[in-house]
Structure formats: C-alpha cells, structure tokens
Amino acid sequence: MPGFYIHIPFCARRCPYCDFAIHIGADEAFRAAYVEVLRREMESALREQKAHEPHSALTSIYFGGGTPTELNEADLAALLRLILENIPVAPQAEITLEANPENLTLEKLKALRAAGFNRLSLGAQSFDDSALKMLGRRHAPRDIERTVAQAREAAWPQVSLDLIYAVPGQSRAAWQQTLRRATQLKLDHISCYSLTIESGTPFARRVEKGRLVPVENDLQADFMNDAMGILGEAGLLRYEVSNYARLGSESQHNLNYWRGGDYLAAGCGAHGHRTGHRYWNERNTARYIEKMQKAGTAHEGEEFLSVQERLSELVLLGLRLREGLALERATQLLNFDVRGALHDSKAWKMLTSQGILR
C-alpha cells in the first residue's frame, strides 16, 4: 500500500546544518501561489494513483519540510482534505505533520488535530541551550516540553521528537542529559541523528575555513551507544539506525521507504517511487512554482531501477532495520528469486564465510 509525501518548504530561517529544499522569507502572495500549484500536483498524483491502483488505500501521509506549520492551519487542513476526499485512505493511516516548537500554539494544534492529522514530529534537536545555539535553533528546551504538553491536551495520539547528537563542542554528559529529559516526556517515538556536515551548508563552509571541527567518529559512536542505552532503558527500542520506538509506534511512513514500498510525492524537491520508477521534482521553490504554472509538472528527473538495483537497495535498507531483510517478502515484492540471487553472489559468499553476514 502506498504512502504520500507532501513537501512544504517554508522556514523562518535556514539552520546552518540544513541541506533540505527550503524557502526563507516568503510573503503571503508567494505562499498562496505555492499552495495553489501544490494542490494541482497533488490532484494529478491522486488521479494517476487511482488509475494505476483503483482499489489501493493510502497507509500513510506525511507533510514534511521545511516547516509545514509555517502555513496557516486552514491551508494545511485544506491540503489534507484534498487527499481524504479524493482517494481511499486506510482507517488506521498514519498522518504526520512536521513542526518546530517555536511556532505552535494550543489553538493551532487543536485545529490541525481536528483536520485529521494524528502524528506530530517535532524538530526538538536538543535540550541543551549551547547545542541549540550552535545549531541555529530559535527555541528553548522549555518550548519543547510546552509543545508536547499542548499536543497531548489537543489529543494528538502520537508525538515524536527529532534529536541531533555529535554537535561540535557537545559533551557526552550534555547529550545524556538531553536523552534523559526526552525520556521524561514519556514519548512513543524518538529519532536521534548524528550531525552530518552537508556540502554547501554554512557548517561546511566553516569546516573548510577551519572554524568548525566535526566530532570524530569514535566519539560519535559513543553518543550513539548512549542513545541506545538510555532510550532502551525507557522502553524505546532501536528499530532503525537512527530511530527508537515503543513496539507498535514505529513510523509507518518511513518503514515503507525502508522496505522498498511505493509512495506518491508532491512539492518542490519531493521524491516519489512506484515499482522501480523513481522521480523527483525541482528543488528551488520559485522555479517549482513557475514550472507548475507553465507546464503542469515540475519533474526534474527520473530513473528506472532494474530488479538487481532494487534488490541492492532492499539489502542496504534492510541492514538499517532491526527486522532485517525478509527474503520471502522481497521475492514477492520484486517477483524475483531473491534468496537464490543473494546466495549465488560473490559478496554474499565472502561475507557469510567470514562471519560478517548471517
């Protein structure tokens, strides 16, 4: 069953580590133009999906960014309603909204919950003031706790936190304290990402000039082990390299990615996939709007994966998951003898003979 990813690029400012497709400083007319062409692309994607699989229901919907809640609640509700009214959606579908703690109110959370969103993914990043300042974040630790409390008051069934570790200058003690404060919130899902220095970002330029020193790999591993230990003690199991959840609260949208599933996509920089056909949109928001207005599509590129290429990806992604790679499921997905193909490969024989792979 497919998912649907919708990209909202607007942000109040660019964080120095960010390499996502975002847009800073949009006025109301620009945002309205984006929402209008986004609606058009969503309608097209839904029509195509219904023609391809008329009886298939969406199992997840994900509004990511950027900061989706930079849009007002009426626009977000209308975009979600467009999906709910035009294609079957599974009764227990996971409908996620990304947000930052500094721009949410109880009233907005109540309105978005009433619109049908049922999972809030908060870009918390840290409970340490120094780390938040280094990361260019505008909120304080108390804002995270306030937003989680308000989300519960607004009856959101699921709340997840994103945290970042291995921030330059961060001590293990400070990271452990962030983890402990996160566990005190009794959440069902927490993501812990090691800071990556992406090319072209302000952080990358600082590294090139010698003004920023990345955390060395062994210490990053210590941070990762701290997350496994502290979150594990709180009942959050590591089900993917960077993700921890109580049983039954894993991100279904992301699991669909990691299991090689299909997903629709709309918005600047969004990527979609259907049975080996991967496509992606123009990243720049202004050019995305222009292409949509002129041509009705903003597709920037596509690729058609062979069965062997899809299998390689399934192995790669399966090794990121606690559940691993289910050979029978992969065989059914690809209509291809996965077990035989792997057992006949030189890499499989070498890795299993050395005890690296089981």
Image (cartoon, rainbow, N blue to C red):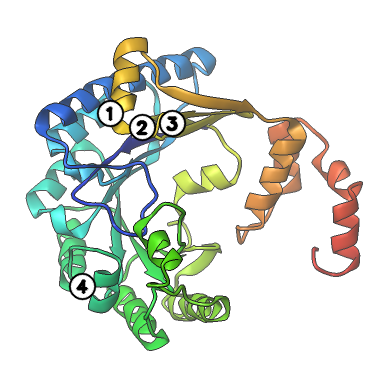
Label 3 sits on residue: 58
Q: Which numbered dot is residue 268?
A: 2
Local packing at callout 3 (Cα closer than 10 Å; few below 14, some 14-19, many 20+) is many
Element marked by disc 4: helix
Question: In the depicted view, which residue is nearer to us: 286 or 80?
Answer: 286
Residue 66 picture quarter: top left
Pointer 2 or 3: first along the chain: 3
Q: Marks 2 and 1: in contact by CB < 8 Å?
A: no
| Relative side of 258 to 268, left or right | right
Q: Nearer the viewer, mark 4 or mark 3?
A: 4
Q: Amino acid at mark 4?
A: Pro
Pointer 1 or 3: first along the chain: 3
User: Could you give the CA–CA distance between mark 2 and mark 3, rounded to whole angstroms?
Assistant: 21 Å
Q: Amino acid at mark 3?
A: Leu
Local packing at callout 2 (Cα closer than 10 Å; few below 14, some 14-19, many 20+) is many
Tell me the quadrant of the picture where the C terminus can be found.
bottom right
Taking the spot 46% from the left edge, 15% from the top edge, the residue there is: 48
Q: Marks 3 and 1: in contact by CB < 8 Å?
A: no
Q: Is residue 114 above or below residue 266?
A: below
| Relative side of 165 to 315, left or right | left
Local packing at callout 1 (Cα closer than 10 Å; few below 14, some 14-19, many 20+) is some
Q: Is residue 55 above or below residue 91?
A: above
